[in-house]
Image (cartoon, rainbow, N blue to C red):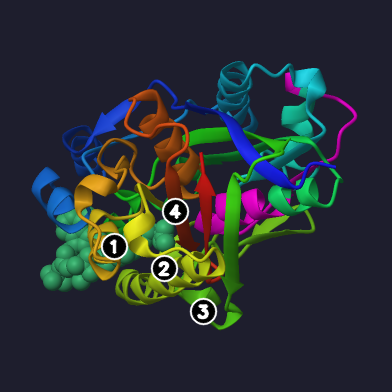
């Protein structure tokens, strides 16, 4: 049995409709909501985001990303024996987005399920796939983060609606004789449910409560900075590495200031950090695989390099994965 798991291909997909901050500000102005490119760039680093068309679901975005990851890995859909989709914006209450995507992909038969850990979802999903490969339960996994956060935004709340976008990223994770994923570290603390949530739910055919995203931005900011640093250090320690060994930090793309703070705490220069939040906004579970794929396809991130992926999100959830590409 092969003892390790390794990423052999990456892919990503953004829906074609791109809104710059100015485009979004103009749309919000028609509803009497005031914002500006200057405010959004200064507080978040975000310059643009993509929004999916109304009929497009997370499984559609994830499918495109998955196809590109399979192509990059040289793997056929029918060879896949595990599909995990990280999403907080599933196509349906059930069945899982992973099952819907599996059928669209033509990989029918293998286990397929969703992971719900909001913006940490891809880190959770990658860690689960790694563990399943290491136990022999799977040998070629598709791990996908896919979101249509535009569906759950409150466009009357300027403190949140300017932050998020839609998109998907995917990796093929295969059993390997040589180490790829070196260590991971996952956490959750449910006492923080209220600072970032979509509190509505379906009951008796109706939606009860508020089915739109609400966030205490400053509480999230403070918590995120501390837990990301703890997860990064714990993951490095498990693998016997230090921050100086990292070639690329690929953080969850929520806010440029959170990423700058993470890099500063690890004493990493920003030119070792993959940043896509400026062009994608916060795409929740999709943001890390989108950033990874952007890094790989731009030629910055190369095979053999040491990558630290780190995520944090609603729950509160957080974690990190250290890997050799
Ligand atoms: N445009 C213009 N003005 C705005 C906007 C906007 N879009 N949003 C808020 N403001 C105003 C506020 O009304 C307030 O005005 P006031 O002083 O007259 O009352 C002022 O700007 C400051 O508002 P704050 O909320 O204090 O702004 P802050 O500096 O905290 O920035 C932000 C808000 C960007 C949300 C910040 O708290 C943050 O980055 N938090 C991290 C949260 C995050 O990134 N979440 C992503 C999801 S969580 C995750 O992925 C982990």
Q: Residue at x 32, y 60 (%)?
A: 244
Q: Relative to residue 138, is residue 130 depicted above or below?
A: below
Please state the horizontal and vertical placement of residue 51, each as a whole percent of the image: 41, 32
Note whether ligand 1 is within 8 Å of mark 3: no
Distance CA(mark 2)–CA(mark 1): 9 Å
Distance CA(mark 3)–CA(mark 4): 25 Å
Instruction: Tell me if residue 175 is in the magenta stretch.
Output: no
Please state the horizontal and vertical placement of residue 146, each as a whole percent of the image: 56, 39
Please state the horizontal and vertical placement of residue 168, each as a whole percent of the image: 52, 34
Marks 2 and 4 close (CB-CB < 8 Å): no
In terms of sequence position, does the residue under pointer 3 or pointer 4 come before the other?
3
Q: Residue at x 27, y 55 (%)?
A: 158
Pick the quarter of the image with the N terminus: top right
In terms of sequence position, does the residue under pointer 2 or pointer 4 come before the other?
2
Secondary structure beneath dot 2 equals helix
**Residue furthest to the right:** 109
State the extent of the magenta-drawn residues as a range: 104-128
Provide the residue designation for mark 1.
258
Q: Is residue 213 left or right of residue 136?
A: left
**Residue furthest to the left:** 38
Distance CA(mark 1)–CA(mark 4): 15 Å
Provide the residue designation for mark 2.
228
Instruction: Tell me if residue 117 is in the magenta stretch.
Output: yes
Marks 1 and 4 close (CB-CB < 8 Å): no
Distance CA(mark 2)–CA(mark 4): 11 Å
Secondary structure beneath dot 3 equals helix
Provide the residue designation for mark 4.
308
Distance CA(mark 3)–CA(mark 1): 18 Å
Note whether ligand 1 is within 8 Å of mark 4: no
- View quadrant of ligand 1: bottom left
């Amino acid at each position: 049995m092969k003892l390790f798991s390794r990423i052999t291909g990456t892919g990503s997909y953004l829906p074609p409709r791109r809104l710059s901050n100015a485009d979004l500000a103009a749309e919000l102005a028609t509803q009497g909501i005031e914002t500006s490119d200057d405010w959004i760039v200064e507080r978040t680093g975000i310059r643009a985001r993509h929004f999916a068309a109304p009929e497009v679901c997370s499984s559609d975005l994830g499918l495109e990303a998955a196809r590109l990851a399979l192509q990059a890995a040289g793997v056929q859909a029918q060879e896949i024996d595990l599909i995990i989709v990280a999403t907080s914006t599933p196509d349906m209450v059930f069945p899982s987005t992973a099952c819907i995507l599996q059928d669209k992909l033509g990989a029918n038969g293998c286990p397929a399920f969703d992971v719900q850990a909001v913006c940490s979802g891809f880190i959770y999903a990658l860690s689960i796939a790694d563990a399943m490969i290491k136990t022999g339960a799977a040998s070629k996994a598709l791990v996908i983060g896919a979101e249509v956060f535009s569906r759950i935004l409150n466009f009357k709340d300027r403190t949140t609606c300017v932050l998020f976008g839609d998109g998907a990223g995917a990796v093929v994770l295969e059993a390997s004789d040589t180490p790829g994923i070196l260590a991971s570290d996952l956490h959750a603390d449910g006492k923080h449910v209220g600072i970032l949530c979509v509190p509505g739910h379906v009951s008796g055919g109706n939606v009860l409560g508020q089915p739109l995203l609400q966030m205490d931005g400053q509480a999230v900011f403070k918590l995120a900075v501390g837990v990301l640093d703890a997860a990064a250090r714990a993951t490095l320690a498990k693998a016997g590495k230090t921050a100086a060994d990292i070639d690329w930090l690929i953080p969850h793309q929520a806010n440029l200031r959170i990423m700058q703070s993470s890099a500063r705490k690890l004493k990493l220069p920003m030119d070792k950090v993959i940043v896509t939040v400026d062009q994608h906004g916060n795409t929740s579970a999709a943001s890390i695989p989108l950033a990874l794929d952007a890094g790989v396809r731009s030629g910055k991130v190369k095979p053999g390099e040491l990558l630290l992926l780190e995520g944090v999100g609603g729950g509160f959830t957080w974690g990190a994965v250290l890997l050799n590409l």
